[in-house]
Each structure stands twice: as C-alpha cells, then as structure tokens.
Amino acid sequence: MTRLLTQVASRLRTIGPWSPRGRIGAQSILASVNALEGETQALSEAQLRKTFLALRFRAKSGEPIASLLAETYALVREAGRRALNMRHFDVQILGGVALSMRSITEMQTDEGKTLTATLPLALMALVVIDYTTGMMRFPDWTEKLPIEQIESQQRWIRRWLSTRFNQDVVVEPMIALPGWKIGRVGSKSVLVINPRNASKFFVNNRQALSADMVSRIASDLEARCRNIEPVRKLKSQ
C-alpha cells in the first residue's frame, strides 16, 4: 500500500514540467482561459455538464491532461461564478496553473486559496481509474499488488476474528482512493472506492454488529497490529 500511495502522489502531478521547447507559459494559459470566458458564459447548465463530460472522455481516450487545462479552468471559473457567485480572478487562475505544473504556490491572505484549489482538483477529476478483477489501471500505469495484499489481509483478519470471538465475522476487503473517480468493470472481490460516497457500500451489511462488538473488534485489532512490522514483498530478481 505504501508503494501505491507513493505512486499516486507522484501521478497527481501529471502535468509537466514541459520541455523548454514545448513548455506552455502560465500567462499564455491564462490568456486561453480568458479567451474562452465568453463562450462558457453562453452555455446552459446542461451544456456545461456535457462539456465537462466530453473533456473526461478525451482524457480517457489518451489526450494529454495538459492540453485540457485551459478548457477545464474556463469551465470551473464559470461554475464558480454561477454556483458561488465567485469568479476566479486572474491571479487565482495563475495559482491553479502553477499547482498543476508541480510548483509550490504562495498566495497572500484573502487572495482566494480555497477557490484556487478547485482548479487543479477539477482537472484531476477528468481522470478515471478503471478497476477490473485484480487490477487497477491508472492514467499511465497499472497496479495489482495492493489488491493481492488486501485480499491476503482480509483472509487472516477474518480467520483471527472468527477464532477470537467464536463466531464467523465477515470482513469485506476495501481500498479507498480519495479524489479519484473509480470506473468499475466486471465482478470483483475487493471494493475500490472514492470514500466521498462510501456510505452507499454499507447500506446492506451482511452482518449486523452491536456497538459493543464493534468496540471489542477495534480494540483487539489495534492491540494485535500495534507492534507488527510491515512486510515488504520483494520482486524476484
């Protein structure tokens, strides 16, 4: 899981830095965003949603995320204006561009850091993780080790808890990836979810546990796992 989180953190900075010849300056991106403002203001609510979905389709089809930056930021600016009555100022667009280019951004108090953060977040929302049985497909790499690890952990935790409490305790394996849209394909033994909508996965619990049982399980698991060193799986040479 540590390896996965490290890779996710690095891939969150998908854009740039561009090569000197092909590098797109922040000012030119700002100019493109401003040029699209009149066009986006003319869109209806349905057209705004449709345009964003079209950007997501282009990203999933392999178009570089960097090439979608100006269009995405123009849509987010218009959405902010309509929903919050807060239009992104040029300095906020530049701050969003800097974040998307893996730069450290410093803004003064009241320059709108929270609104600025919506820009790169919307850009990354274009990316969908395809999850098939035993495999997670990120924008430019695949992962199966976390699936194998969580399945192994689920088996031993279920055996241990069932033995300890002298009853079958169902354990559902799950991986939560905040901020990512998860595309589910086929049947799977492990849930891979965005925790923002996690509640819908617990509506039909297979096994209802009392508050006392939940407390006992949590306490026993904490005691059991407190001093366990992580096991590193080494690739065969």
Image (cartoon, rainbow, N blue to C red):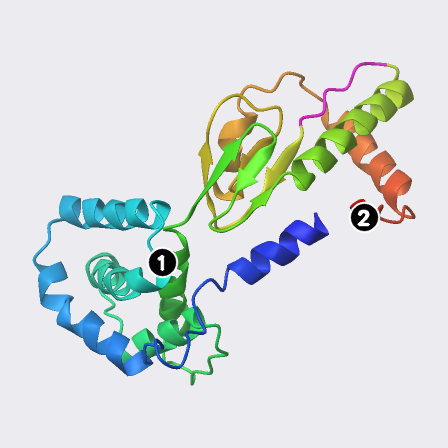
Mark 2: amino acid: Gln
SS for dot 1: loop
Q: Earlier in the sequence, mark 1 or mark 2?
A: 1
Residue at the far top: name it: 167
Residue at the far bottom: name it: 108
Give the answer, above or below, for where 73 lies relative to 195: below
Residue displayed at 84% across by 42% down = 222
Residue displayed at 42% across by 85% down = 108
Name which quarter of the figure residue 134 lies in: top right
* Mark 2 surroundings within 10 Å by alpha-carbon count, few (fewer than 14), some (14 through 19), many (20 or more): few
Q: Secondary structure of the magenta portion, mostly? A: loop
**Can residue 132 be seen in this snapshot?**
yes
Q: Position of residue 132 (x, y in %)?
A: 52, 30
Q: Which mark is residue 237?
A: 2
In the rendered structure, does residue 169 fall within the stretch colored magenta?
yes
Nearest the camera: 20 or 95? 20
Nearest the camera: 84 or 197? 197
**Dot 1 and dot 2 residues touching (CB under 8 Å):** no
In the rendered structure, does residue 212 fall within the stretch colored magenta?
no
**Can residue 89 be seen in this snapshot?**
no
- State which region is magenta: 167-172
Q: Position of residue 55 (x, y in %)?
A: 27, 51
* Mark 1 surroundings within 10 Å by alpha-carbon count, few (fewer than 14), some (14 through 19), many (20 or more): some
Give the answer, above or below, for where 39 lies relative to 90: above
Name which quarter of the figure residue 82 lies in: bottom left
State which mark lies toward you, 1 or 2.
2
Give the answer, above or below, for where 91 lies relative to 237: below
Q: Which mark is residue 64?
A: 1
> Marks 1/2: CA distance?
34 Å
Q: Position of residue 80 (x, y in %)?
A: 26, 62
Left or right side of 155 for 163: right
